[in-house]
Amino acid sequence: MTGKPIISPAVYHIFREMMMELSGYNIDRMYAHIHEFAVSRQMEDTVQALSFARKMHAGQYRKSGEEYIIHPLTMACHALSLRIADDTLISTILLHDVCEDCGVSPQELPVSPEIRYGVELMTFTVLEGETKDAAKRRYYDRLGENKTAAVTKLFDRCHNVSTMAGTFSKEKMKAYIEETREYVLPLLCRTGERYPDLAGVLFSIRYHITSVIHAAEHILRTDDAEKKPALFS
């Protein structure tokens, strides 16, 4: 099983398709929901970010086989479901992977400078002569200094841990959980201390992330235990 997801991609994809059909959870409906909400609230940057993100992510796919745009759309819908109607945050969520994955500079984004900066902070880079671990520490430290970027990262991790079982190998899942515990949950705590107005939102995100990783760790431990040779036969 080394190098393969815990759940086979085929089974995972079928399950996802069933859930999406039952819940109306699909790209067109999410896009329309976000667009309608943004227009009704005069969230001009969100309207621009929505169409730009879909255009730039066209032809890109997640490891699950889904169109990549489903990732930022899901994050945005999650934020809206928690009654977040912040134009800057929703726009940053929608654009958070555009610079890193589409070769677009922050200056090219059709949104405000504040949103461009948030997306820039969300873009992971390794500087010349810098180790990946050092780059990761610098990345999370900078995220913690910006409210929009920090919350965007938390929604990002929330969705990614929810989908890792069908796409990550055991080794990658363990590493991802470790990174979540070492960097993401402390970021969540710091964000809560700095911005008490986000207490309800952060509780929901923490509950979601920790519930998923606890379940994943249980599955991983059970799987490892089943593969250990018996002491007596």
Image (tube, rainbow, N blue to C red):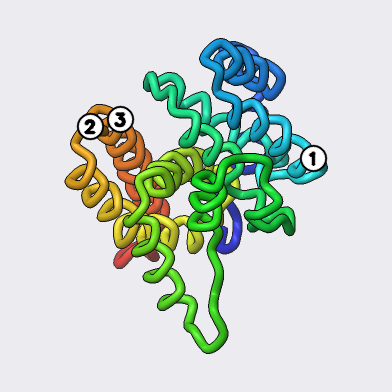
Residue at screen point 71% across, 51% down: 108
Where is residue 194? Give x, y as percent.
21, 46
Q: Which mark is residue 58?
A: 1
Count of marks, rendered view: 3
Check the picture and name the quadrant holding the N terminus.
bottom right
Is residue 199 rendered to the left or right of residue 100? left
Numbered badge on residue 197: 2
Q: Secondary structure at mark 3?
A: helix
Residue drawn at (40%, 52%) of the image: 220
Q: CA distance from mark 2 to mark 3?
A: 9 Å
Residue pointed to by mark 3: 201
Image location (x, y in percent) of residue 35: 63, 18
Secondary structure at numbered mark 1: loop
Q: CA distance from mark 3 to mark 1?
A: 30 Å
Residue found at x 49% / y 50%: 118
Q: How far across and how far down the image is residue 230, in percent?
A: 35, 63
Tell me which amino acid carries mark 1: Ala
Secondary structure, mark 2, is helix
Q: Is the residue under label 1 in contact with that under label 3 (CB below 8 Å)?
A: no
Single out the mark in the foreground, 2 or 1: 2
Q: Residues within 10 Å of mark 1 (few under 14, many from 20)?
A: few
Alpha-carbon neighbours of circle 3 within 10 Å: few (<14), some, or many (≥20)?
Answer: some
Farthest front residue in view: 113
